[in-house]
Image (cartoon, rainbow, N blue to C red):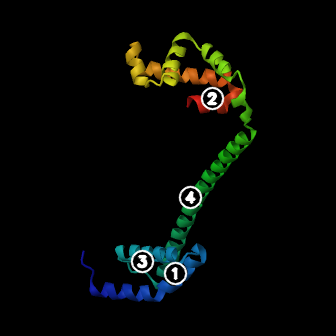
Amino acid sequence: MQISSPHSSQFEEIYLSHYFRMKCFATEYLICEEDAENIVQDVFLELWEQQFVLMSHTRLFAWLFTATKNRCLDLLRHKTVIRKGAEKMRDDYNIELQMKLQSLEAFDDKIFSEPDIESVVQKAIETLPGKCREIFVMNKIEGKKQKAIAAELNISLHTVESQMAIAHRKLKDALKEYIPLLLFLFF
């Protein structure tokens, strides 16, 4: 689309007379001068694209500042949402970190030196239902892959996965006092 020369010179005049004040206005609220410049440039681009249907000077001035204000509001809202999201992630991470620290501090490494720890684990494994125990032993003790277990037992991979989930859940409950050991041995 070809823009006529009178339109271009009129736009340049508006740009030169209002750009600095609009940028100062935007910078006051956005703090970052680069964000303010981008917003004011976007407002002028919109004005150019609309070919600024000839307005009175007062209406044009009000439109420019209203458009700048609204874009500043949008940017501030967007940055607030992003900051809240980042803070939530940081808070969640700190909570998880704190829980892990407390868990590790509470971990009693004497459980590794208990003479009957092997029998405790073995008894817990023996409490598993037959097929569940067989699949668990094949996977965790014998080191077979779940796909190979499914083929060997002529069952679906889904069955192997669900039996392993049952085994993990039951062993976690049976060995709750030994959770760090369970994690160390089987996962």
The residue to which callout 3 is attached is 44
Q: Residue furthest top?
A: 130
Secondary element under disc 1, as helix, strand or loop, is helix
Secondary element under disc 4, as helix, strand or loop, is helix
| Between 92 and 173, the one nearer to me in the picture | 173
Instruction: Name the residue at 37% across, 17% down.
Output: 151
Front tag of 3 and 2: 2
| Between 82 and 160, the one nearer to me in the picture | 160
The residue to which callout 1 is attached is 23
| Between 91 and 186, the one nearer to me in the picture | 186
Q: Earlier in the sequence, mark 2 or mark 4?
A: 4
Instruction: Name the residue at 61% across, 32% down.
Output: 183
Secondary element under disc 2, as helix, strand or loop, is helix
Which numbered marker is on residue 82?
4
Q: Earlier in the sequence, mark 4 or mark 1?
A: 1
Q: Position of residue 78 (x, y in %)?
A: 54, 61
> Residue 174 appears in which quarter of the rendering?
top right
